[in-house]
Image (cartoon, grey):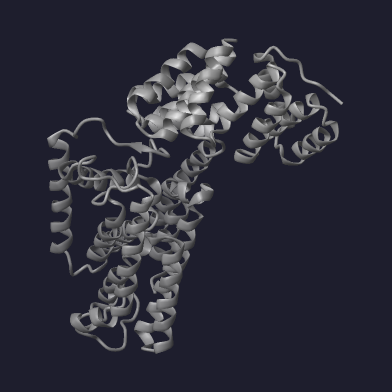
Amino acid sequence: GVTWPSLIVGALFALHPVNVESVAWAAERKNVLSMLFFLLALHAYDRYGRTGRRYLYLLVTICFALGLMAKPQIVTLPFVLLFWDYWPLRRMGGAGSVAEGSPAASTPRSFRYLVWEKFPLFILAAADSVVTMLAQRAGNAVRTVTEVSLSARLENVFVSYVRYIGKALWPSRLAAMYPRPANSLPAWQAVGAAVLLLLISAVVLRWRDRRYLPVGWFWFLGTLVPMIGFVTVGEQTMADRYAYLPFIGLFVAIVWTLDAVASKRRIANVWRASVVLVVVLILGCLTYRQLGYWHDDETLWRQALHVTEGNYMAHNNLAIALAKQGRSEEAVVQFQAATALHKYPPDQVLNLAFYELRVGHPQEAIEEAEAVLRASPDPKVQSAAWGEIGQAHLQSRQYGQAEECYQNALRLNPENGMALMGSGVLALRQRQFELAVAQLMHAARVEPNDLNVLLLAQALRRAGHAEQADLAEAKVQKISSDLGHAQLEARQWLSFAGLEPLSH
């Protein structure tokens, strides 16, 4: 009902650079979709609160359920609707000042009635919260108390709230990953942040006659609760995408307050509009720049390393991006930087051994894989480590050691694709062609990638099965995303065994 402040809040939401992550990252389409249903539910509730028509409440429930299915970030909607009852609908405890906003709802209600009215929504929220927690635990995403202590969680909660406010007012040094500090935060930071939050809350409650202030502020605080870190998920301390919904409340509190101050001081509309245009223009430019960082993986993670410290996830993801481009030497440097900052599980350390092999460092790969053998009792992980060591020996033309390592790997896990492939190549070298076909066929069943099928074709051709070899090579042309690269890898594997590829 108040056009210009509403428009400004919408413009801030649309152009604030912190929202780039939710829109530019394809995986966060769920964030945008859940927000759509959240806003539709809010609009339907606004109509319901003013008219009392029951079908509109059903529409609220349906939109809420759809939003939860997209992403559980909107689980706090029932609480937001209680704020909505307080302002701008003013259904709670009687009508407020008409000057605050649009016309009040037709019938004021008691707080108890308004809470009971939302009982179906609370049930939906509770059920979705339980399902989400179970899913996160099943995926091993939830950090235990031994991993992240209660004191560390509380410190992060207070500091993150203040950091989010800082990002809203001064959106700089935005990153795709804000790493958890290796050590506890300084006590003054956590205490200072907690005191600041309490002071702001006290001021807001002191001026509660300006209903937009408590609604906007507690919207911000409340809707961040599921993502603020009480339940710690993943490695990040905060994330830009988590602010997508909460910042609307902060924008409402700020914009309506500034509008009230400008009206009280009788500041001319032209000056108000000029300030708004400058702010929106600056945010638009920052958003355009932030979009550029999301152009590709390498740019994104180099920017994250530039604006954060000790960010092992950014090093790791940059290494993966470089490896995909065939820049294995640079990838190894980034993998090493990541492992220096973080103690990876043994199965992930094998990634470093793999890339050491890619850049022709077999001895370093053997050392990494042997460290995994010492650290992990898991048979599958040990099998993978033996496979890496076997590949390193094969690359060094140490055929006896390679064969022994592959046998160790297959004894622990008969479905180890790398060991099957290496054994097949060694069988080719020993002119045991039928054995090579059997091993490489097994490898292609376990891991049906283009490299395995190309090596299988070579084994079939050497075994005298030219027609089957032709069929296998035709299959590769259908499944391979980069046939030239696959053929180069196949030639390298054959060259390790002292063989040349056979053609038609």
Q: Residue at x 45, y 25 (%)?
A: 385
Judging depth in this view, the residue of 385 and 23 nearest the camera is: 385
Percent of width and height locating residue 141? 35, 47
User: Is 319 positioned to the left or the right of 167 in the image?
Assistant: right
Percent of width and height locating residue 352? 46, 24
User: Is 157 positioned to the left or the right of 173 in the image?
Assistant: left
Q: Is residue 318 depicted above or below 361 in this figure? A: below
Q: Residue at x 33, y 52 (%)?
A: 137
Percent of width and height locating residue 368? 42, 19
Judging depth in this view, the residue of 176 and 397 nearest the camera is: 397
Instruction: Write down the quadrant of residue 474 in the picture.
Output: top right
Instruction: Write down the quadrant of residue 261 in the picture.
Output: bottom left
> Is residue 24 shown to the viewer in this render?
yes
Q: Residue at x 16, y 64 (%)?
A: 207
Q: How many marks?
A: 0
Q: Is residue 164 depicted above or below 330 in this figure? A: below
The N terminus sits in image quarter: bottom left
Percent of width and height locating residue 429? 69, 16
Q: Is residue 241 depicted above or below 187 in this figure? A: below
Judging depth in this view, the residue of 261 and 376 nearest the camera is: 376
The C terminus sits in image quarter: top right
User: Is 132 positioned to the left or the right of 27 in the image?
Assistant: left
> Is residue 330 shown to the viewer in this render?
no
